[in-house]
Image (tube, helix red, strand yellow):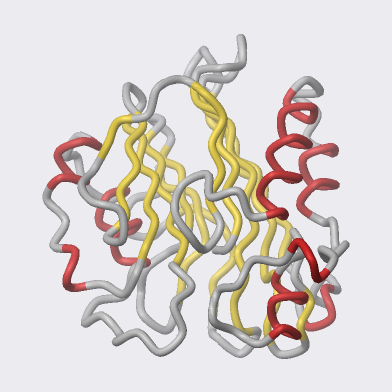
Amino acid sequence: MCLILAAWKTHPDYPLVVAANRDEFHARPTAPAGPWVEDPRVLGGRDLEAGGSWLGLRRDGRFAAVTNVREPGAPKGVRSRGLLVKDFLLGETAAGDFAAGIQDGDYSGYNLLLADGRSLFYRSNRDGGARELAPGVYGLSNHLLDTPWPKLVIAKARFLMALEALPDTRALFELLGDRETVRDSDLPRTGVTLEWERRLSAIFVDAGAYGTRASTVASMAQDGRVRLEERPFGPGGAPPA
């Protein structure tokens, strides 16, 4: 997952709203979003290679999502970052306690958002310990929370406007489908080539064998109802046949 936008306790009807794009190699085996075998209350996709997930929402409001930290050449962790999402969604530990108990050294660089219906927490093993987030709108890409990369600044501004249309989610999916890249003078320098900086600067990434695999909109309403919509994509950004 390379873009997560989250509104926490800012909408009058939806305490939690998430819009996210998962960017990954198209060859990596994946199961589409749906109820999990281990617990049908959990809705989300599955990484069939390492067994974890990038984002999921449980019917009682439990939520988790993860992005990697872009750091070319860094050592690989012994556990998949997606297992953090899986373990939280299948457990009962409060979000703050779970975040505080993570063994950071087991994982490559990660950013993690966790909600248990009462609190929203953020943790990164590149940014110190866990912290509870106040009501507000937050954004994650492949650096720390709210790092002002151009794609994230643009996406957050559009996210705020799209929230006004809920329960209609079309504006959120339109935002997630934006393929416009950023001009070179505004690109961050993250250790990849200039060509890759350009490709990865779009909200929706289309880079041949790598790109946006799924766009997801998830929400929890005031009455406790949860909703998760996923739109999958294949190479070239086309919906799968």
- Rendered image quadrant of residue 30: bottom right
Q: Relative to 86, is 41 above or below?
A: above
Relative to 214, 87 lies left or right: left
From the top left corner, tell me how far across and down residue 187 is, in percent: 72, 66
- The residue that appears at 25% across and 57% down in the rendered structure is 87
Residue extending farthest to the front is 185
Q: Relative to 10, is 198 above or below?
A: below
- The residue that appears at 29% across and 87% down in the rendered structure is 75
Residue extending farthest to the top is 12
- Rendered image quadrant of residue 201: bottom right
* Front one among 201 and 237: 201
Q: Relative to 122, is 162 above or below?
A: above
Relative to 121, 17 lies left or right: right
Q: Relative to 192, is 186 above or below?
A: above
From the top left corner, tell me how far across and down residue 72 is, in percent: 46, 85
Q: Quadrant of the N terminus?
A: bottom right
Relative to 234, 126 lies left or right: left
Relative to 126, 206 lies left or right: right
* Front one among 177 and 189: 189
- The residue that appears at 14% across and 39% down in the rendered structure is 97
* Front one among 70 and 62: 70
From the top left corner, tell me how far across and down residue 23 is, in percent: 62, 70
Q: Quadrant of the C terminus?
A: bottom right
